[in-house]
Image: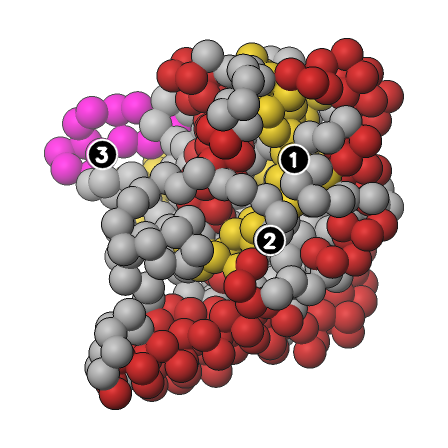
């Protein structure tokens, strides 16, 4: 049985969501049509919008359905940036260094294609934003900043950022602020109206946009949302029928919206109790890893972090090799953002590399024993990698095309095209259970893509 500890990448779709999604799929009609079937589809769509909006503390009309977090972030940053150029040139874009690549790559795209000037805010050793530097950036460049953005909770190390204070700095500088809440959604209470009030955001200044995604809370993949304040103006990325306040033209996915709504409502009902339970499980996992591998380093803020996140660095061990050996043992983790699968870690804007990966207890699937790892985190993987005993990886066909794992990394969610086999050398350190799981007969274990 696989212990799935990669909920930071995606969560299992809940059975209630699958049932609602399948039922809505049977509804025929374009929600933009005025005939009966079209209006029935529109009713389902708008009711879903209301239900999701209720979990975000915003008005339904402020909620724009998108294809997910990446599109939401792109729409917010590019749309706000473009609109801010209309009365005069504002080239600066302010963002912390450790953002998700949906943000980092968007800012860099604006730099290359629109002449934007990124203003990066450094992070400390715990992944926290430097508020002093942020205040200096707003004070020095305020009139020239087109848009500011920040992660609420880091998707890799789990650190929770002081977003109300960041939004307050933006509001004082009359700068629109976007909040990436994709990893925070389902774990932290989100209420756009309360956040705007607490940060002094008024009109188009301060917190005006917020991104979330359904598949982080047990909903379907392929749908997310961007909340855009009524007072904000965002230029659209795509044009056509003018749906959703003209911010995202195109026929809307009714079934996905319904599935999203069910997942959002279940999350809202269970969030408080679930986060308490997950925090306890996370602490058990952290204690177990530290007891088994004393030199393991927990990264991120030790207290102000997501209840579902644990991110470790194993000194002297390569992250992708650790990932592969854990995968063979039936433990699914990752070494970085899923959108950057195959990398050892996502480096910060200051160029500091990382190793290790987020290991988070499952949210709502499996047993407590699964989340505890059931003792499947012996010292074997770390010892093998540090001593060079991680094995030789090669194509299974005729044993040709040898490649080290570091040059052809695998991810926690699948195998490279063509599959791999691993030849494990000699005896290794670690428990008998670990060796028995990795060695069969002659010591070769073969795995292929499903």
Q: How far from the left and from the top, in percent, is residue 130?
A: 81, 24
Residue 102, compared with residue 66, is above or below; it is above
> Which of pointers 2 and 1 lies earlier in the amino acid sequence?
1
SS class of the residue under badge 1?
strand
Q: How far from the left and from the top, in percent, is residue 59?
A: 61, 65
Mark 2 crowd level (few <14, some 14–19, many ≥20, 10 Å Cα)? some
Q: What is the distance, in whole Å, between disc 1 and disc 3 at their CAs?
A: 51 Å
Look at the numbered discs 2 and 3 and tell me whether their residues touch, using CB distance below 8 Å.
no
Q: Which mark is residue 395?
A: 3
Q: How far from the left and from the top, in percent, is residue 371?
A: 65, 63
Q: Which mark is residue 433?
A: none
In this rendering, the label closer to the viewer, 2 or 3: 2
> Which of pointers 1 and 3 lies earlier in the amino acid sequence?
1
Q: What is the distance, in whole Å, between disc 2 and disc 3 at their CAs?
A: 55 Å
Look at the numbered discs 2 and 1 and tell me whether their residues touch, using CB distance below 8 Å.
no
**Disc 1 marks which residue?**
176
The quarter of the image holding the C terminus is bottom left
> Which of pointers 2 and 3 lies earlier in the amino acid sequence?
2
| Of 352 and 370, the residue lying toward us | 352
Q: How is the image coloured?
A: secondary structure
In this rendering, the label closer to the viewer, 2 or 1: 2
Residue 140 seen in render: yes
């Amino acid at each position: 049985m696989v212990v799935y500890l990669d909920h930071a990448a995606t969560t299992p779709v809940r059975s209630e969501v699958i049932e609602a999604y399948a039922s809505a799929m049977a509804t025929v009609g374009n929600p933009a049509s005025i005939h009966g079937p079209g209006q029935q589809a529109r009713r389902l769509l708008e009711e879903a919008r209301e239900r999701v909006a209720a979990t975000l503390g915003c008005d339904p009309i402020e909620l724009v359905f998108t294809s997910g977090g990446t599109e939401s972030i792109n729409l917010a940053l590019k749309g706000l940036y473009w609109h801010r150029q209309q009365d005069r040139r504002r080239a600066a874009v302010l963002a912390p260094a450790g953002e998700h690549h949906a943000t980092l790559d968007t800012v860099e795209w604006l730099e290359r294609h629109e002449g934007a000037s990124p203003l990066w805010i450094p992070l400390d050793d715990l992944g926290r934003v430097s508020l002093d530097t942020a205040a200096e950036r707003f004070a020095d460049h305020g009139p020239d900043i087109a848009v500011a953005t920040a992660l609420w909770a880091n998707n890799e190390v789990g650190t929770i950022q002081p977003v109300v204070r960041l939004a307050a700095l933006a509001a004082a500088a009359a700068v629109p602020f976007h909040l990436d809440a994709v990893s925070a959604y389902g774990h932290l209470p989100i209420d756009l109206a309360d956040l705007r009030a607490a940060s002094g955001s008024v009109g188009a200044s301060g917190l005006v946009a917020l991104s979330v995604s359904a598949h982080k809370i047990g909903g379907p993949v392929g749908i997310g949302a961007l909340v855009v304040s009524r007072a904000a103006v965002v230029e659209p990325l795509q044009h056509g029928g003018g749906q959703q306040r003209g911010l995202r033209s195109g026929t809307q996915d009714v079934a996905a919206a319904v599935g999203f709504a069910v997942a959002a409502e279940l999350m809202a009902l269970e969030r408080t109790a679930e986060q308490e339970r997950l925090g306890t499980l996370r602490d058990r996992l952290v204690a177990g890893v530290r007891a088994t591998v004393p030199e393991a380093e927990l990264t991120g803020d030790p207290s102000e972090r997501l209840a579902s996140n644990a991110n470790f660095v194993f000194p002297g061990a390569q992250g992708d090799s650790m990932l592969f050996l854990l995968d063979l043992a039936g433990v699914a983790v990752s070494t970085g953002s899923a959108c950057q699968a195959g990398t050892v870690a996502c480096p910060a804007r200051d160029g500091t590399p990382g190793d290790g990966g987020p290991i988070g207890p499952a949210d709502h699937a499996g047993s407590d024993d699964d989340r505890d790892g059931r003792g499947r985190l012996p010292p074997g993987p770390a010892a093998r990698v540090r001593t060079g005993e991680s094995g030789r990886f090669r194509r299974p066909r005729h044993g040709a095309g040898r490649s080290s794992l570091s040059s052809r990394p695998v991810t926690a969610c699948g195998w490279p095209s063509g599959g791999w086999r691993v030849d494990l050398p000699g005896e290794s350190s670690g428990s008998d259970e670990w060796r028995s799981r990795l060695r069969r007969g002659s010591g070769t274990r073969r795995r292929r893509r499903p």
